[in-house]
Amino acid sequence: MRTSSIAGATFLLLGAGATAVSAAVDTTGSNLVLNGSDTLFEVTQNILTACPTAVADGISYAGGGSGVGEGAMGQNTQEVSPMSRALKTGAYCGVTIDRDGDGVKETNVTMTTEDLMVGLDGIVIEANSVNACTNGLTTGGSFQVTDSSGNAVTSCPGCDSSGHYTIASSLDALRLVYGGFHNDAGHTFDCNSNVRKSLVKNWNLLFTGACATNNCAGGLTHAWRRSDLSGTTDAFVTLVGFGSKRGIGTLSTAPVNAARKPNPFCNSTDASAAPGAACSSTVPCANTTTQACDDNGLCVPQSFGGSSDFSDLDPIRVTCAAGEQVCNSLLSSDGSALTATSGTLGLVSVVLLPDNKTNAPATTDIYPTRNCSAGKFDLVSSGNNHEKCPGGPNFLGQCFQPFFAANAADTHHFACLSKANAHAFGSPSGLDGRAWNLPLKQDNAGGLYNVDANGRENILSNFRIHTTTSASGATSPVCTAADDTTQIGCLVNADPCSIGYAGRLADQAGLNQAESVNGIFATDANIINLVTGGTPVYPLARRLFFASLVGFSTGNLRGGEAALASCYEDNNIVKTAITANNFVALPSPGIKCFSYDDAPLPGCADGNPSSITNCGAPAGTVPSFIKNSF
């Protein structure tokens, strides 16, 4: 069960006012819980099974996201990381690490940083097999834009004079659903537009061909997405094409500057914030530390990676179904009253399981199956970093929290499921009691909220929306997966009018299906074309990596990490694990090694290293440490 991740990345990547927790520096390469890609969670578990020396040396894997693993390497808490994207230059440019194990940090990380390309994947758009009656995401088509009353709209971004909007491609539709990105000349970003609302309320518009029976007459219920620090999200933002001014912020300890990009997703604070003054490439925003210039020439808030992981600010609100087990209260700022959209969740919703490796929550904390005892609440401190109590006013820094207790003498168990009709003292009239299920609470820690790898409280656990009931209220299917990717695949089944993006591991035959994108399916052949030059190339194909700032060819890896690297360097082991988890093995000769060892790196600051080399081996050959080439 993946329940933990790094507890000390001081690169932070969170909002102002947050603090990081410390983690031990990696001095031996052994007895470590490693962080990295959730996409490669099962692959790494399989490789560890085939790598007993690494396990004997105390190596285990927690996932948490490529960005978390990348940051952990930069902080010297680990020296290797599975990643669903290549290393960003911010991970090794200007970073100091102990690359030779002598306890002294050195600065020439660019001389040792290396990536093993270990496989291929396609980010898939999953939909329910029954309700998505066709197997293709829409590739185009025109629709009439209407307002909230159903009246035709004649003025809207990207529309013609009669108010019709034309979708140009599958990617065009994804940009609009997830980011409110319009295809007009100005590339309007508007998550609350009538265009976006009209698209998502018509299920059939999302797919090629209309369903004979529209089982989703109410439209799209949720658009599941991976977290900000996920390599899958990095790749999705890039491949879908949110524009040159949009994207997840670079992982870097450097000061925030105009190169940092606002977050593109409609659930985020950036997407919901009102734009500021006009700006351009020659007229920057007044404060480039807090604002950046977007595609519309307007100043918008800067974003740190991870800023939207616990945000539910999508202006398209979906009323919580009877079978859903989390629901946002959307209280007034002082928690004394409900807002007009209480009892809803935003359309775009993040799936992020707990990723801390200290004080890791138990499985029963993450997916509680007990209902909270009716009418039972304790006034407790739950950490005080969150802005407000989920169920009502804050009393002297404490919140009323529901609990389960079998009898009067039983311990008060705060990891429980609250029902919609739950109500505590001071809760606003009409509150949906499922709001108490949003924060992830530690059962045996007095109601304290779980804290993630970046020191943020897990205040929005949308991933457990169907812990014991599906959207219909049935007890099957329910979703209690160990990783984010598999959970998204499951949620598309439990909530059959939803879609989600994830790695191919999310594809669950017979229950959900990967939709074609621009008419191209995520087949092995179409994904392999990404590296062979063949056609067609699946539009959301990507490379998978195993990375190290101290390098694989240098001999500087130690202990269990060196043993794990040796297994990741073995084509037989890697191919078996890659194909067993629905990824695509590399064509002959197999694993490739890339070394970022230019000296100097003139393009280091802008994310474009001048060149990469073959990890010490002549070009076109296989480095000697890579075993069993095909």
Image (spheres, grey):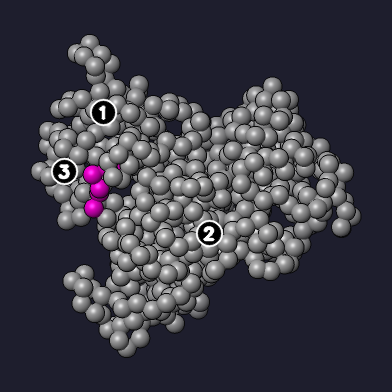
Nearer to us of marks 1 and 2 is 1
Label 3 sits on residue: 431
Secondary structure under tag 1 reads: loop
* Amino acid carrying mark 3 in the image: Leu
Nearer to us of marks 3 and 1 is 1
Label 2 sits on residue: 236
Label 1 sits on residue: 371
The answer to whether the residues at label 2 and label 3 have Cβ atoms under 8 Å apart is no
- Quadrant in which residue 160 is drawn: bottom left
The answer to whether the residues at label 3 and label 1 have Cβ atoms under 8 Å apart is no
* Amino acid carrying mark 2 in the image: Phe
Q: Residue at x 78, y 50 (%)?
A: 590
- Residue 274: x percent and y percent? 31, 66
Q: Residue at x 72, y 43 (%)?
A: 575
Distance, label 1 to label 2, CA atoms, is 37 Å
Few, some or many residues within 10 Å of mark 1 (<14, 14–19, 20+): some
- Residue 7: x percent and y percent? 51, 34
Q: Earlier in the sequence, mark 2 or mark 3?
A: 2
Q: Residue at x 59, y 38 (%)?
A: 42
Compared across the picture, whether 82 is left or right of 267 comes to: right
- Residue 593: x percent and y percent? 77, 50
Q: Earlier in the sequence, mark 1 or mark 2?
A: 2
* Amino acid carrying mark 1 in the image: Asn
Q: Where does the magenta region start and end?
A: 319-324
Dominant secondary structure, magenta? loop
Secondary structure under tag 3 reads: loop
Could one spot residue 210 in this view of the protein? Answer: yes
Few, some or many residues within 10 Å of mark 3 (<14, 14–19, 20+): many
State the residue in front, 259 or 584. Answer: 584
Q: Residue furthest top?
A: 409
